[in-house]
Image (cartoon, rainbow, N blue to C red):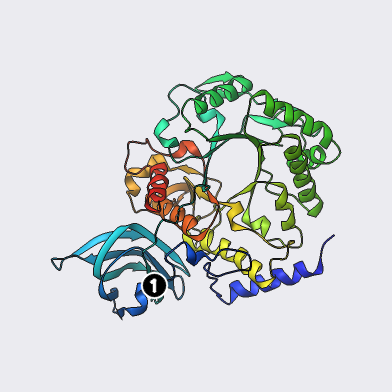
Amino acid sequence: MIRIRNTVIALVLCLAIALGIVVAFAYSKEGEEDVKTYTNYSVDYADTATTATNTEGVTIDLSERIEFNTIVLHEDGDNVTNFEFFYRDENGDMIFFYRQDFIGEYRYCSFPSITTDRIEIKILDSRKAWEIGDVEIFNMGATYRDDFRVTAYAVCKTICTEGSIDARHFRPITNVNLISSIYFTAEGEIYFYDEEINGKMMDGQEIFENALKNVRSVIQPGTDIVVTLLGQDRNGSGLSTPYIHDTAFDANRAQFVENAVEFCNKYELDGLSFDYEYPQDQEGWANMFLTCKELKEALPGKTMSVAIGPWDMRIFNIFDHSYLQYVDFVENMNYDLFDEYGYHGTFAFSAYREFAAYEFANDAFDNDPYMYTDKAQLNLGLPFYSRPVNKAGYWGDYKQYAEELGKYGNIITNEYKEGDTYYDTHYNGYQMIYDKTVYAIDSGIGGVMVWHYACDVNSDSELSLWGAIEDAINSRK
């Protein structure tokens, strides 16, 4: 039943975002450990610093030489498009150590520890006059938790051939989600999808089994392998995705659960997952999660997860957050979210703002089970691909432009052409992936999720995004 309160919640959240309310993660809730007890958020070295602003940026003179590894910036507005950090060494020289693109309402910047008594923030480019509202400086400690998850979505056809997988990439990965070869019908039957690989048609079951074999040959001990079952028309039925899902999850649920359990057990998988992004009503969501509940009960000891767009979880009069009790965790798709300038996957817009919204709802409505979202159950989605600023249906692979982006870049100029016009594209480069991973660890988010495995460069490159995740994790151990 749709509760009237949900509509009120949606209005309050919209108002909060419109007013620019900043939601802090480090606060206590009854029965929950305060984030500050296992991080160093409580010591902000900027509190005792002297700050001076000029036309080039901000200079921060600390009260003494201190060690730190995180700077948080808050911008009044959304104008900065390129900034750098420098520190003063013992010889008095200013040394570069960090660069990124946008700041916005909240920008979490992390790096290997630095000791200094002066920091300079250089604003290299901005859309118009900029103003830094606040700066925070932290020396975060060992915030890593052993249950922190790193999920790699792996498209079966991209990893089914010899040499298509890199063992070193899998060092930080705790969960592998195989996708795009296994589908189900409205009647609840499961089938494999044949595809063209290197110019030849390949049997779908062979694609899947080769991909599974390749993954099992390289994963770390304890890594879970799950499969996403997709309800899309790949067998020529002509049926829509909503109809396939809603029918399999409702009228034919018993048959679907039986077939899914048989499939999971046959291949000795560690669990199953769904990627149904657009249920059209509350009943659609309910049917999916009740299917998850029955699968969990029929597969004891195995995991059940779902990929959900944060745009869906914010529709409070349709999405009932109490459904989340039926899954182990949620792959939160924090990408393809465009800011007002067309950039996707920016830190403030696709990471901070999304999780701040959950925190605000939890606090404002006193952990109402119909509204509560435990961020430890969520994985922060990380894109290893680009989108153009005109939001066209183009997805570029990071590995094609890694060298041009370098360690600190996120934007490729004129990558995408539509008609006679070229458009810039936005990636998440090495530093952005590092920052988002550290942010997830420090903030108590359950993990990170990557779409998708095969977009990265080789593991021996210092620009590897899997390497960035591993480096970020090691920095918090």
Which residue does the image show at 48% across and 25% down from the upper left? 217
The image shows residue 126 at horizontal and vertical percentages of 37, 69
Of residues 399 and 190, which is closer to you in this image?
190
Secondary structure of residue under mark 1: loop
**Image height check: is 356 above or below 173?**
below
**Image height check: is 60 above or below 177?**
below
* Residue 74: quarter of image: bottom left
Of residues 178 and 174, which is closer to you in this image?
174
Q: Is residue 429 left or right of residue 304?
A: left
Which residue does the image show at 63% across and 49% down from the upper left? 330
Which residue does the image show at 63% across and 65% down from the upper left? 31
Q: Residues within 10 Å of mark 1 (few under 14, many from 20)?
A: some
Return the residue at label 1. Answer: 44
Q: Is residue 11 left or right of residue 433?
A: right
Of residues 401 and 209, which is closer to you in this image?
209
* Residue 251: quarter of image: top right
The image shows residue 109 at horizontal and vertical percentages of 39, 61
